[in-house]
Amino acid sequence: MSVLVVWLVVIPSVLVLLLSTNHNDAGNSIIKAKITNTENGETIFTHAMQPLTESEYEKISIRLTSLSKSKDYVRINGKPYVVGESAERHGVLVQRSGSARYTRDYYGILAAAALARLYERGREIAVFGSHPPGDVKFREDLMKAVIGDWYIETGQHKTNFTVIYANTFDEPVGGLMNLLLTEDGQHYQYGNVGAGRSLVIDIGGFTTDWLAVNPGGEVDYSLAQSIPIGIQKVVTDFEESFRANHLEIVKDTPILPPAKVRQAIVNGFFEGGGRKYPCKE
């Protein structure tokens, strides 16, 4: 399940990058990226991004020893950022939704950060970006957000990528094809599904998308809708309910750590102050 998906096709290999605002285990906002023709070419990180000042970036990056955390601190086209779970600890996050996502300083930055995690060397890339059916009118913005040069620095490592081509498709179609086709995309693994008429329901972070598909995979655009409700509403409702039932422990905590909120939804208890608070209800 996801709201925003980007497929990056690397010449000659293929990279699939899904920029999503939720995860299928309780609404964890994530970025997923995968190189389809390798066994281990995959990365996942929390959908969060914050610009940093030069002094913040220098102070933190020179002290990082964990390779996984160093990937969170990147300089992209000369500007420092923190992405992933580390970004959630740098103040209040403003997570964009709808058409506001399709900009070079947001969509483009997250895509570039994913590339930096997957490749040791730069290269030319073509981008296939998916969108909710209701965002088809913003497809030009999505493509413009990624086309061009990306100069990326993580620690002492520097790489250059050039996006030379971009195109888009409806996100629910990608979800259906993921079910129908084999890993190489050339054969059917569940041909009986493709033989009938299908309704794809894609529950995302900020939208729920509906798309009808005719036998053989042809999209029926007479039934293509995006409804503005998703998993993020579940997370918000959970946090409000938890606060109402635990007033004493949250009264001095204006913001609950997002990672702990997600884990509480999954595990049924919230960890804080050295204690575990049951919250299954």
Image (cartoon, helix red, strand yellow):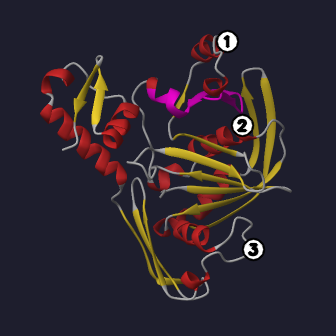
Q: Quadrant of residue 155?
A: top right
Residue wearing tag 2 = 116
**Residue 77 belongs to the span the image colors magenta:** yes
Q: How far apart are marks 1 and 3 (CA)?
A: 46 Å
Q: Work out whether mark 2 precedes mark 1 in sequence or the reverse, and give the earlier one.
A: 1
Marks 1 and 3 in Cβ contact (< 8 Å): no
Judge whether 217 appears above or below 65 on screen.
below
Residue wearing tag 3 = 186
The residue under the point 67% across, 77% down is: 188
Q: In terms of depth relative to the viewer, which is nearer, 24 or 244?
A: 24
Q: In terms of depth relative to the viewer, which is nearer, 267 or 87?
A: 267
Badge 3 local density, few (<14 within 10 Å), some, or many (20+)? few
- In the image, is 260 to the left or to the right of 47? left
Disc marking residue 47? none
Nearest to viewer (mark 1 / mark 3): 3
What is the span of residues highlighted in magenta in the rendered image? 71-88
Residue wearing tag 1 = 62
The residue under the point 25% across, 38% down is: 239
Q: Work out whether mark 1 precedes mark 3 in sequence or the reverse, and give the earlier one.
A: 1
- In the image, is 102 to the left or to the right of 234? right
Q: Where is residue 146 in the image (x, y as percent from the top left)?
A: 68, 50
Q: Is mark 2 on a helix, strand or loop?
A: helix
- Amino acid type at circle 1 is Ile
- Amino acid type at circle 3 is Gln
- In the image, is 158 to the left or to the right of 199? right
Q: Where is residue 167 in the image (x, y as percent from the top left)?
A: 69, 64
